[in-house]
Image (spheres, coloured by chain):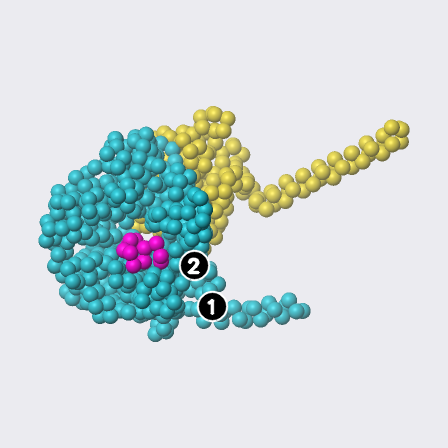
Chain colours: A cyan, B yellow
Amino acid sequence: MLRLGLIIVALSVAPVATQAQSQKVGAPPETSNMRLVGYDELQGRSAYQPTIHRQGNRWIAYIGHHGGTDDIPTPVNPMTGKAEPNGTSIVDVTDPANPKYLRHLPGQPGTYEAGGAQMVRVCDGATLPRGDRSAVYLLRTFGGEAHEIWNVADPANPVLVTRLGGLKDTHKSWWECDTGIAYLVSGAPDWRTRRMTQVYDLGDPAQPVKIRDFGLPGQQPGATGTVPTELHGPISTGPQGNRVYFGYGTNKGGVLQIVDREKLLKGAKEPTPENLRAPVVGELLMSPWNGAHTTFPMLKMPVAEFAHDKDGATRDFVMIVDEAILNECQEARQMVWFADVSIENRPMVVSNWTVPEASGNFCQRGGRFGAHSSNESMAPVFYKKMVFIAFFNAGVRALDVRDPFQPKEVGHFIPAITDKTDKRCVKVDGKDRCRTAIQTNNVETDERGLIYIVDRANTGLHILEMTGEARKVAGLP
Amino acid sequence: MTPARRRTVIQALLAATLVAGLGVLAEIARKRVALGPTDGAGWRPIEWPFPRDGWPPGRAWRNRDGIEVYVRPKLGFCGNCDTGVVTDDEVDRVTDIDLLDERFAPVQEGRRIRITDLFGRARLYKFKTRLGNEEVAEGIAVAYKCDLIVALVAGDDVVDEAVRKRAHRFLESNTVQVWVNRQLEGR
């Protein structure tokens, strides 16, 4: 009788608890130790990645977009009055409380992942070895078919410099501004995988020089057998660190690959299995249940707990962030893993972190729940102290990573939804059941200590700052 | 040991053997019931024969001629939600042919295939069994929006197009489609 009573109570409470967690237009954001500073709706376009760049005394945010939605494939740009395929939003965030939308640069026509211009990197011409010193170069993808470089010295009036086309896909590339070396995530037509690496010298963006193709053995043209997990993106530590950390996979079969940069650039270029293996110094094969979307190096970190140990007091880490891709928890949890890569040929996961699902009934809120990406800025303000993780319907999460063996959440911000926020649907009994929830897709920080998050479900750009005790983690006043 | 004692031991052994035998038969029957009945065309469900990997296990069937079919959905795995599976590279990448042999090799170019209302590609592959014998299997991948349904057709005569067509008809049958649709629930 008692069990029956409990079941009745549970059944009557559960829908109320779930409803209480659903997001409503007009409701306040859910926050802890983070505060909204400024906002731009980004013309209601689905956003992938923000990159923040200082240009003189201005701060400009460049935001890459996915393609449009089935309902609105080409949103109207109110500045031109024209329907434009999603591309790149350019926003002046010098005054973060009053961001000014400068320009929408259209991308490849197409919806969702099939269009847009998701990825953005920016380098000054004065920093690149052979660039126009007055130029500021924006490297972006053009849907899946090309990489483009634009001169955005006048961010409101970009000028196309270079186009590298003929690809079957693209994704999140990396560009070393001091050397010009770019690791372009591409789909070379003859490779067996949708995404691999094309290494280019973009030291003079007007004269790109191809260095080599790279990927996991088995992905190269002419191979047979299993096709290894496709690339998601690399992060290089440049000539000083001499390492490139490649992340393969999104939500399945992840691989962290540690590559000797010098050997990659100067080694034999023919994509044979031997040549593809030659620059690799270590690999971490993850569980088939998790992918490696972002592989963010945090090297030479002293670990307080080991301060008196004769060996291993300072460690090298790579934070691996998976990407959730299915709505409403229809896959294994995608989260954050910290790998100790001090001994590079034997990397080992030493800790992990996720948002507790029960803290917000996130599997019932709608859309994706799980990690997607981290900030990639290595500016001193947050580097090796605090990282920010985009966690889809759980917003952005601030982690104290001063001891990567024990990462701790110290703040979060889940933006309010707006009338622009797009629904996410799943099939129940053969019919669409749709819910509307925030889908924080990517996050980036700037040297001023501001945090920029963008939303995949069209909610826009939120500019945030840390508050309260959490500021002390980063040493902010 | 006295004759009486020996008789008792033998009787006990016989009883134990009988109990164990009944147990095994009951387990076999339980599994058969759990897997489901044989359909009118002679396709009988068998256990999913592959070890756990990143995708949920699928379903497998064998017909009277020893042809086996393995099917499972791979949710969110389609490389291009708009075009579906249109290249042989994509078939190599997404089908489960590597579960039979990671060093599989294609026999010929693939071709377009339609399974009920889903379109994709099918390709024949050579692979080696655990005993080292070279065999041929067909890998199939069809797309439903951003999701894939992948299937393998394996057995002695898979090079015979008529055999493969019988397997394709089975993939279109209610036996398979009801299960596939249930797996796509929530998408």
Q: Is residue A226 above or below residue A87?
A: above
Front residue (pair A96, A370): A96
Name of the residue lying farthest toward the bottom: A26
Instruction: Inspect the image, locate mark 1, and give the three-letter code of the amino acid beneath it.
Output: Thr
Q: Secondary structure at mark 1?
A: helix
Q: Chain of mark 2?
A: A
- Residue A453 appears in which quarter of the rendering? bottom left
Q: How many neighbours does mark 1 have within 10 angstroms: few (below 14), some (14-19), or many (20 or more)?
A: some
Q: Position of residue A119 (x, y in %)?
A: 25, 52
Residue A421 in view of the camera = no
Question: Residue B131: where, in percent of width, then height?
Answer: 50, 26
Q: Give the answer, above or below, for where A412 lies relative to A145.
A: below
Residue depicted at 13% across the width and 42% down the height:
A207
Disc ID at residue A408: 2
User: What's the magenta region?
Assistant: A376-386
Q: CA distance from mark 1 to mark 2?
A: 26 Å
* Residue A423 within the segment the image draws in magenta: no
Secondary structure at numbered mark 2: strand
Q: Label 1: which residue?
A: A18
Q: Which quadrant: the C terminus of chain A?
A: bottom left
The majority secondary structure of the magenta stretch comes to: loop
Q: Residue A455, located in which quarter of the rendered image?
A: bottom left
Quadrant where the N terminus of chain A sits is bottom right
Residue beneath the point at 24% across and 64% down:
A42
Q: Residue at x 78, y 34 (%)?
A: B14
Sequence-earlier tag: 1 or 2: 1
For the residues carrying marks 1 and 2, which lies nearer the camera in this image?
Answer: 2
Q: Nearer the viewer, residue A411 or B51?
A: A411
Which of the two residues, B179 or A381, is positioned nearer the viewer here?
A381
Q: Position of residue A324 (x, y in %)?
A: 39, 54
